[in-house]
Image (spheres, rainbow, N blue to C red):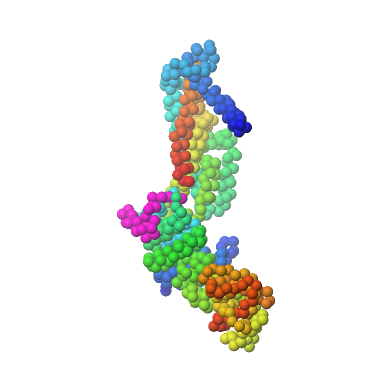
Amino acid sequence: MSFLDLKNVTKIYPNGTKAVHETSLSVDEGEFMVFVGPSGCGKSTLLRMVAGLEDITEGDINLDGKLMNEVDPSERDVAMVFQNYALYPHMNVYNNLAYGLKNRGIDKETIEQKVNDAAKLLQISDYLQRKPSMLSGGQRQRVAMGRAIVRNPKIFLFDEPLSNLDAKLRIQMRLEIKKLQQKVGVTSIFVTHDQVEAMTLADRLAVINNGIIEQLGTPIEIYDNPKSLFVAGFIGSPQMNFLDGNLKNKTLSAEGFEIKDIDSDFEGEVTLGIRPEHLSQSENALISLKVELVEQLGSDNLVYGQLKNKKDFCYRCPGNQTIEKGSNLSLNIENNKYYIFDKSTGKRVN
Amino acid sequence: MTRFITSSFSHLILLIGILIMVVPVWMIFASSTHTSSMINMNGLQMFVGDSFYENYLRVLLYQGGFFKEITALKMFFNSFIMATGVAILSVVTSLMAAYALVYYRIKYATLLFWIIFITILVPLELRIFPTYSVMAELNLVNSYFGLIVPISASAIATLFFRQFYKTVPDELLESAKLDGANTWRFFVDFLIPLSKTMIVAMLIFMFVFGYNQYLWPLLVTTSEQYWTVVMGLKMMSGSIVHRFAFVMMSMVPPILIIIVLQKHFIKGVFQDK
């Protein structure tokens, strides 16, 4: 049994909404697990069930070999960082960090030691006497993490902690969280709807949709080998291009081109997925793109345009190429990196 | 220029308002420092006389009532006990009632709250006989307990605390739970400190409410030993200057409470910002 074990966990709210469907998942000790999915997909509910803030309708949650279903949140030895930090507004930073320790009956000297260590680690030693209202967003974020670290919990839970920060600070805090987790080595679950955050932080990633884990794996596995249309569309930025097509006798006919010798016995309506970065320009290629807009990011150019059948399409090329608006590009798929999904079920078929 | 005129005009109106409120009080005070023959001959006075100590001391220590058992000093003591008791008891019960209504999973909590709320529409006078008979059955007539308890359930304070608790974010409770706080600790360590300013405001409000009670103490006390200041205002006999002096003194405790607690009130408001 691994460190954290979810077995057929289901959550049905009193109003009948089914937020989480029979989800099973294992997290190893010291692992950084990220739950990613669109809002309302049940990822936060799953996290809150681990914390004990939501009752479990069905299934079991085991933490460190102990069944947690009926254990009170205060007894679970988990720490959580909330989206709005939930700092204690009437206590200064020191007491914010110390509060959880005081409740556990730890003596004053040890508390002081631990709080000072955590404050040093997070570089908030100078603000210990301030109230949360006197801190900036990034500092509050650090205090919230300090409050989690100082207790030395079995598991860290992060509920979209970076979504209240501005873009620059978010990237900085993302790095800090990752570094910190590696330094402290605590098992962590991080919930986010931002796929870049998910990819950069995770040891393993669970892509969740409609209360179901669509795919579980390392970020690269999921990027390289999405098992469903949803995962393929959710992970990767800019989004994967999707084209309608028909698969018959190992030949895919899409609008305007054909791909032969496909490694699949599936026959019928399919969706072809091609990542913008898996394309290259060449003479007489498969896809012909009429350029409408070019976003120059410096390192890359994002080329947006339409195919012959007026379908929107995106192509990513190195930033040193000049591409004129209104020109026609002819594009090939690199190394046969394309994904074919059953149109009716969304499952991968190649 | 027009701004100067409008602003002086509004100041003038405010000034008139202040005068209307202050002048009568001042006249009572000024008159209470004269001898009664002076007032009887010349009417109310605008300037302070020289019988201040004489009049006030006599009022404080004079043995009044039908049985000559009660002094004004004792009345102030009774009023203070009653007002403080009402203030503390009603704030404590409302805090706890609101906490239960908002944070406990009580079925029909909203309905219960509205039932409590409706009691605002039922004045004490309406329930005064049943309440009296309960107190009489319990042998609590002529006791501080009987003076305080029946008027110490405040629907208004419960309403205020409930509305405030509802604005406290859920994450705070959840975070506290994960930090090992049980329901009692959350109440004591979070809600009470967070509602400090509101508690002070309610204490002032309920103190004045308790101090101003007239009908209830009149009914529930038969012994002069339990007379309160507000009852004394009516019962007090004697010359007009002594009554004026008593009226002046009866205003002091509520004003004092506001002055003393307002400091904390303002401090709390600014610190929490």
Comparing B70 with B199, the one in front is B199
Q: Is residue A155 above or below residue B272?
A: below
What quarter of the picture does the N terminus of chain A occupy? bottom left
Quadrant in which residue A245 is drawn: bottom right
Residue at image point 61% right, 87% down: A260
Location of residue A23 in the rendering, given as x and y in whole percent from the top left corner: 52, 71
Q: Is residue B109 visible?
A: yes
Residue at image point 67% right, 77% down: A308
Location of residue A153 in the rendering, given as x and y in whole percent from the top left corner: 39, 63
What quarter of the picture does the C terminus of chain A occupy? bottom right
Residue at image point 63% right, 71% down: A325
Residue at image point 50% right, 27% down: B230
Q: Residue furthest right?
A: A309
Q: Residue furthest left?
A: A109
Comparing A183 with B186, the one in front is A183
Location of residue A314 in the rendering, given as x and y in whole percent from the top left corner: 60, 73
In the rendered image, residue A111 lying in the magenta stretch gets the answer: yes
Q: Main secondary structure of the magenta part?
A: helix
Location of residue B36 in the rendering, given as x and y in whole percent from the top left corner: 49, 14
Q: Is residue B222 visible?
A: no
Numbered marks: total: 0
Q: Is residue A117 above or below residue B152?
A: below
User: What segment carries the magenta color?
Assistant: A108-133
In the rendered image, residue B207 lying in the magenta stretch gets the answer: no
Direction from residue A128 to residue A169 in the image, left or right: right
Comparing B21 with A283, the one in front is A283
Comparing A63 with B86, the one in front is A63
